[in-house]
Amino acid sequence: MDLARAHGLSTQAIRNYEAAGILPPAERSPYGYRAYTPHHALALDAFLALIPGHGHRTAAAILQAVNRNATADALRLIDESHAQLLNDRRTLLAVEAAVTDLSPVRPERAPTFIGPLSSRLGIRPATLRKWERAGIVAPSRDPQTGYRVYTPDDIRDAQLAHQLRRGGYRLDQISPVIAQIRTAGGLAPLESMLHDWHTRLTARSRAMLHGAAALNTYLLASTTNEQ
């Protein structure tokens, strides 16, 4: 099948995309063979171009909407992806600002308890307990008293979380950031991680532009075919 070969796909993949509504229905020959046209190639081009920026599921939903003449639904999905990308950029900027605010802080050398830490941050102990349930801080327990014990790393995480909360970020947004910092081994390796984060967002933004161009070509062709 020429369409499959030109895109480096299997013939079964093309059939699956048609069955899923990602490609418009193909006409059949008297012998039942599918006849794929340049219009199908444009649809496949658009789908494959949208995947890097929007993900497979959203790219599929966009093409499905276009092929059922629900262009407004397709554009809404694109808008939602752009909104998520903008939110990711804002989160990255907030993390960078929070890390900058933390950098002059004297490194902690000794653990502390919930009362002193909450006082230092200007929050209630109940807030720290809430952050613990969200996985943002993970204090150990004193074996004698059962009190929460916050290590220097826990204190760092709590300080960063406090900065992000002041920036308006939710706990479910903060928790993955803290997890990334733990994986990186602290704030020192974070610079490389933030650079990679910037690179990924830039690549995603460029991919969205490329996908939009391919989709627009398909939309224009679809409009022409309808006339």
Image: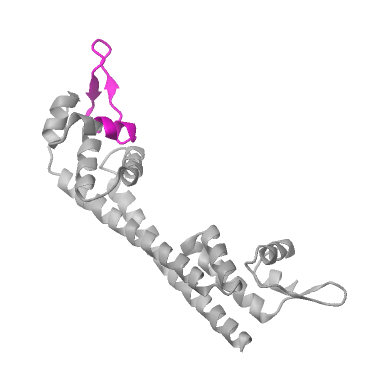
Against 225, residue 31 (above or below) is: above
Is 129 placed left or right of 26 in the picture? left
Residue 20 shows in the view: yes
- Quarter of the C terminus within the rendering: bottom right
The magenta region covers 129-153
Say which quarter of the image contains residue 113.
top left
Please tell me which residue is depicted at 28% across the width and 38% down the height of the picture.
186
User: How is the protein colored in the picture?
Assistant: one colour
**Residue 144, percent across and down?**
25, 10
Task: Decide whether residue 163 is among the magenta residues.
Answer: no
Please tell me which residue is depicted at 64% across the width and 76% down the height of the picture.
41
- Quarter of the N terminus within the rendering: bottom right
Please tell me which residue is depicted at 23% across the width and 12% down the height of the picture.
145
Task: Decide whether residue 145 is among the magenta residues.
Answer: yes
**Residue 212, percent across and down?**
47, 73
Is 225 placed left or right of 117 in the picture? right
Against 197, residue 18 (above or below) is: below
Please tell me which residue is depicted at 65% across the width and 70% down the height of the picture.
23
**Residue 224, percent across and down?**
59, 87
Against 38, residue 162 (above or below) is: above
**Residue 72, percent across and down?**
48, 72
Is 175 placed left or right of 20 in the picture? left
Q: Which residue lies furthest to the bottom in this view?
A: 227
Is 156 placed left or right of 28 in the picture? left
